[in-house]
């Protein structure tokens, strides 16, 4: 990726410092809980890997995959459940880990789905909050960063399955 195609929004050190803070807060809040950290694939896998290493309480880890984007730069509005967790969420305090929350549609759907599956509680941890795009109300219990503008890539965030491997978060100029 050419430097002219991107603007660095968050460097690797800033991301790691914030993840440590999030891990400390989550560890305090779940000290007596039965924690299941549930990552939303594919975008959350990088963030979640670093986050669980920053959490200092016993926990289980699993993943769920949903889709609302397809190959475009904006949501289709339809949620498709692509894969379910291998661990039954019933009886767990679920921490849903997302890379980015914009419209809120996916997280709202996932929270209702997990509650229907018998989770004791469902809280949300998101690396990026783009609240200005919110069309569905959701509460983000643990927020890494609020970034109002731009199409973001890197650190798990992609455009057409590219850029997830960047250790930084960038604004991708002119995604097509």
Image (spheres, grey):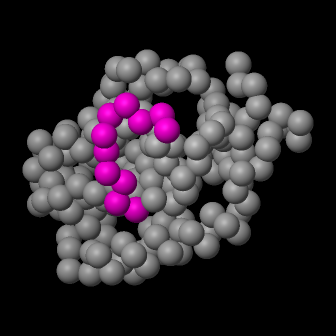
- Is residue 36 at least partly visible in the picture? yes
Quarter of the rendering containing residue 171: top right
Residue 5 image-quadrant placement: top right
Where is residue 102 drawn, in percent x and y? Answer: 46, 38
- Name the magenta segment's main secondary structure: loop
Q: Residue at x 88, y 41 (%)?
A: 3
Q: Compared with residue 131, is residue 160 higher up or lower down, i.e. above or below?
A: above
**Number of numbered discs visible in the structure rendering:** 0
In the rendered image of this protein, does residue 160 appear above or below residue 4?
above
Q: Residue at x 32, y 34 (%)?
A: 136
Where residue 59 appears, as percent x and y from the top left, is 31, 70
Residue at x 49% of width, y 48% of height: 129
* Residue at image location 61% in from the left, 73% down from the top: 17
Q: Is residue 142 above or below residue 150?
A: below
Would residue 62 be found to the left or right of residue 14 on screen?
left
Q: Position of residue 16 (x, y in %)?
A: 62, 69
Q: Quadrant of the N terminus?
A: top right
Q: Which residue extends farthest front?
A: 132
Q: Which residues are magenta?
A: 132-142
């Amino acid at each position: 990726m050419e430097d002219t195609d991107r603007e660095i929004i968050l460097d690797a050190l800033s991301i790691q410092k914030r993840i440590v803070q999030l891990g400390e807060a989550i560890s305090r809040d779940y000290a007596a809980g039965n924690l299941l950290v549930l990552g939303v694939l594919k975008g959350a896998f990088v963030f979640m890997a670093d986050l669980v290493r920053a959490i200092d309480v016993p926990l289980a880890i699993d993943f769920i995959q949903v889709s609302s984007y397809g190959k475009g730069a904006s949501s289709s509005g339809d949620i498709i459940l692509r894969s379910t967790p291998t661990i039954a969420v019933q009886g767990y305090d679920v921490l849903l880990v997302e890379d980015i929350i914009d419209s809120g549609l996916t997280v709202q759907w996932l929270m209702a789905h997990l509650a229907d599956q018998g989770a004791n509680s469902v809280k949300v941890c998101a690396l990026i909050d783009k609240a200005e795009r919110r069309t569905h109300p959701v509460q983000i219990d643990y927020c890494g960063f609020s970034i109002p503008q731009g199409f973001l890539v890197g650190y798990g965030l992609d455009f057409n399955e590219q850029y997830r491997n960047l250790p930084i978060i960038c604004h991708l100029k002119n995604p097509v």
